[in-house]
Image: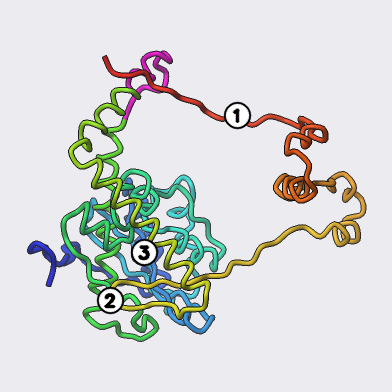
Amino acid sequence: MLPNGMQLFKPTWKTTWIKTTEELESSIEWMMAEEKLGVDTETAGWQVGNETLCLVQVGMPTRREVLLIDPLTIPDLAPMLPVLEESGPLKIAHNGSFEKKQFERYKLPYKNTADTFFMAKELRADLPGHSLRACCREILGFDLSKAEQTSDWFQRPLTFSQTEYAVSDAEVAVYLYDALKDFEDLLYFDPELEMEELMGILRAARDEHYALTRAVAKELALCLAKQERLKSCIKERLEAGEPAYEGVFGEAKMNQSRKFEINPAKLREVFPEFAEDLIRETVEKKALLEALEARGFSKKRMDEVNEVVGFTNRLSIKLSDSE
């Protein structure tokens, strides 16, 4: 059951399969004639560490057409180079780092791009989530099926449901970009304005924000604080050894990421010609404070061993009260 009678998206653009090098070469002219393209890819084998690019979807809004380019029958995607270069059309994808990775497999660039995931995070930080499905629901007003996301994209022929899914993402990417771009245009101000004018606009925006949220400010603060406390509680439970959660409300787990630091001895061994120019003695401020406290010294004694080594610019803004 979809919320509030929301409709499930059904693609409306024409679908064209590109299965040979000749067909791909012929389609480049179509893509290059577009100002922007919706781009998506599907892979198989990522679950077992043997990822294979199985499909490239390119949505062309002027032609109202989605090309389904088949890398399983086209050994080299090099003809796409003009499209993927900086001088090519704007490429739109949701979380486009995934697409970039796929094209890099073919030693192809992925430049002149727009990522609707990061656009949505910046422009609509209020949303409960920024997945493509969440953005479609909250920004475009329709739901997007993800039932085929992890299906077997290596199989041929694809099922009707897989094809519809693939076409949908390329078409929807363009709609989402247009909606976010319209929203972004509402934020425009002339960056060359005098400082006083910029500060005036900033204060007016602050006042408008407060006016809009004043009636629910307390409830909003409670919701945000409660979320943070719940996250802290869940983190503590997981760190204490409680099993990860995966269920109807989503998932919660602890991920470990490796921390790296340069080994000075190895640096001297591998790059003796410039190692000494880079190696510096350092003392962590926190460790020094703890050592002073443990030995009964005042924290102010740290000033005796401090040296100014540079400066960091930090913006400080204090808006005056409204009249």
Q: Going from the N terminus, do you reach mark 2 or mark 3 first?
A: 3
Residue to which mark 1 is pinned: 313
Residue 98 image offset from top left, x and y in percent: 46, 64
Q: What stretch is highlighted in magenta?
A: 188-201
Task: Name the residue beneath numbered marker 3.
Answer: 40
Name the residue tied to disc 2. Answer: 248
Look at the image and tell me in which quarter the N terminus lies: bottom left
- Tell me which amino acid carries mark 3: Asp
Disc 2 to disc 3: CB gap under 8 Å: no
Amino acid type of the residue tagged 1 in the rendering: Asn
Label 2, residues with CA under 10 Å away: few <14, some 14-19, many ≥20? few
Residue 190 magenta: yes
The image quadrant of residue 246 is bottom left
* x and y percentages locating residue 111 in the rendered image: 48, 50
Label 2 element class: loop
* Element carrying mark 3: strand
